[in-house]
Amino acid sequence: MEHNYQGPSAMELHETATSVKEVASRMTWSRIIGALFFAGFLVYGIGAAVVSSIVGESGFVATIPEHETLLVTGVLLMLLNVGVDIGKGVLFFPIIENYSKRTALVYFGAVTAQAVLLAVGGLFILMLVPLGAAAEEGAGSWVEDAGDALVHGNTMAYNIGQAVLSFGGVFLSWLLFRVQLIPRALAGLGVLGYIVHCTGSLADLFGLDISVFLLIPGAIFELGLGFWLIFKGFNPEAYTNAFRSAGGSLVGGSESG
């Protein structure tokens, strides 16, 4: 008996190649975005800890000259996070735009505004360097008052930035929950976490020092999101549907709101 075996058709081969490309694209983008979430925690967390160790004591301005290199290093790490955050907004934009252009714009705008505010706060801390030099040369007590004002300015910029970021984060998390790009339990934690974090940041602006506790759910979400994206990636079906609705490209939108 003669068997006529016919290999896969050209259409089947094309569909297979397209599927492989989509999986590769999904995991590449997922891992880069996930890595940026971890990188943000690392660089800003270390930088802020270094800065706090120097400016956390009364009369710190007089000690700035001997810790100048360490202080500048801490600020540079904080400023490095600016690029990391904007990178998250840029890379997320074409993916979530396929579901909601409004959400993509809100999140990108919030991340950018937060990055600018963090940069302003970092520049406030850098201004402590000339103040330290003035204190070393015997300037009056005004340098301590100016130093306290600059540190307070950094704190204000940070809290306002976090409140703005949380606003955009709620939009992002709700979209992730709605379209199931990630598990709904994780996305739901993001919605809750950003709302709570925004509340804590605003409370700090009015003198209620509670943000350190209220940032925990949001921090768990961002770390969990980073972990999930690196090892699992976006939901294949949800990602592919958006990918195909955009005409085979990551650039484009399937809905405007």
Image (tube, rainbow, N blue to C red):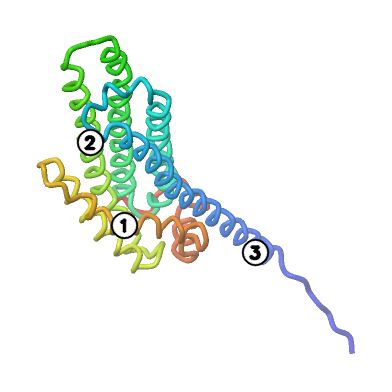
Residue 16 bears which disc, if any?
3
Task: Look at label 1 and name its amino acid.
Answer: Ser
Residue 155 bears which disc, if any?
2
Apparent side of residue 199 relative to residue 188 in the rendered image (left or right) = left
How far apart marks 3 and 1 lie (CA) works out to 32 Å
Task: Look at label 3 and name its amino acid.
Answer: Thr
Apparent side of residue 227 relative to residue 184 in the rendered image (left or right) = right
Residue 154 bears which disc, if any?
none
Residue at the spot 31% in from the left edge and 37% down from the top edge: 52
Characterize the local packing of mark 3: few (<14), some (14-19) or many (20 or more) Cα atoms within 10 angstroms.
few
x, y percentage for residue 61? 26, 23
Apparent side of residue 118 relative to residue 83 in the rendered image (left or right) = left
How far apart marks 3 and 2 lie (CA) works out to 53 Å
User: First in sequence: mark 1 or mark 2?
Assistant: 2
Picture quadrant where residue 182 is located: bottom left
Q: Determine the secondary structure under disc 1.
A: helix
Does the rendering let one see residue 170?
no
Task: Look at label 2 and name its amino acid.
Answer: Thr
Which residue occupies the foreground of this view, 1 or 172? 172
Q: Determine the secondary structure under disc 2.
A: helix
Residue at the spot 56% in from the left edge and 57% down from the top edge: 22
- Which residue has dot 1 on it? 173
